[in-house]
Amino acid sequence: MLKGIVTVSLKQDVLDPQGLAVQHSLQSLGYSEAQNVRIGKSIEIWLDESDLKKAELRLRKMCEALLVNSVIENYQIEILELPLELEE
Amino acid sequence: MLKGIVTVSLKQDVLDPQGLAVQHSLQSLGYSEAQNVRIGKSIEIWLDESDLKKAELRLRKMCEALLVNSVIENYQIEILELPLELEE
């Protein structure tokens, strides 16, 4: 069993109204050092697979097929090996 | 300038209907190895601050004040030092 983590973020030129709203809220709360906020997704997928390379390839395909809109989003993949008893 | 990354995930016992929907979609698409899917947020915040320790403390306060609902969510903080020309 492997755990894949896909971090999906909006491309740099894409407007992020949610991030902007959070940035303004932080500044109203006195956190004036918060200069720019972007909000993306963090998708955790437990994979019934033991081969790291194969898992990464399949995860990349899942991103392209469903998880990521490549017109407006970028993604990063991380794969962790977890012993069963440590799984969340 | 520092970049903080806050990863917000639902606590283990909290139902995640969005994750479940994605899991079912992946399985319908033939990715039967996708056993469990949880969807969280990845929040990037550029901080006008140079002290790593101070930035982490402030970021933690932002999480507690606004970014994270500690009743149902957990969070992790990561802080990166970025030279200005490398900022996204």
Image (cartoon, coloured by chain):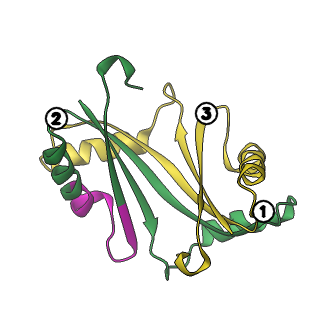
Chain colours: A green, B yellow
Query: For this view, does B84 lie left or right of residue A25?
Result: left
What residue is pinned by disc 3? B72
Say the numbered circle drawn on residue A25: 1
- How far apart in space, not on screen, are marks 3 and 1 (Cα)? 21 Å
Marks 2, 3 in one chain: no
Q: Is residue A29 magenta?
A: no
The x and y percentages for residue B21 are 33, 44
Query: For this view, does A7 lie left or right of residue A61?
Result: right
Question: Marks 2 and 3: which is nearer the front?
Answer: 2
Q: Residue at x 17, y 37 (%)?
A: B33
Q: Is residue A71 magenta?
A: yes
- How far apart in space, not on screen, are marks 2 and 3 (Cα)? 29 Å
Q: Secondary structure at mark 2?
A: loop
- Mark 1: give few (<14), some (14-19) or many (20+) Cα within 10 Å: some
Q: Residue at x 67, y 35 (%)?
A: B70
- Mark 2: give few (<14), some (14-19) or many (20+) Cα within 10 Å: some
Instruction: Locate the C terminus of chain A and report the quarter of the image it occupies.
Output: top left
Question: Marks 2 and 1: which is nearer the front?
Answer: 2
For the residue pair B7 and B67, the one nearer the viewer reads as B7
Q: Residue at x 31, y 72 (%)?
A: A70
Residue type at mark 2?
Glu
- Residue A27 drawn above or below residue A54: below
Marks 2, 1 in one chain: yes
Say the numbered circle drawn on residue A38: none
Q: Chain of mark 1?
A: A
Residue type at mark 3?
Ile
Query: For this view, does A16 lie left or right of residue B1?
Result: left
Specify start and end residues of the magenta stretch as a single range: A62-75
Q: Secondary structure at mark 1?
A: helix
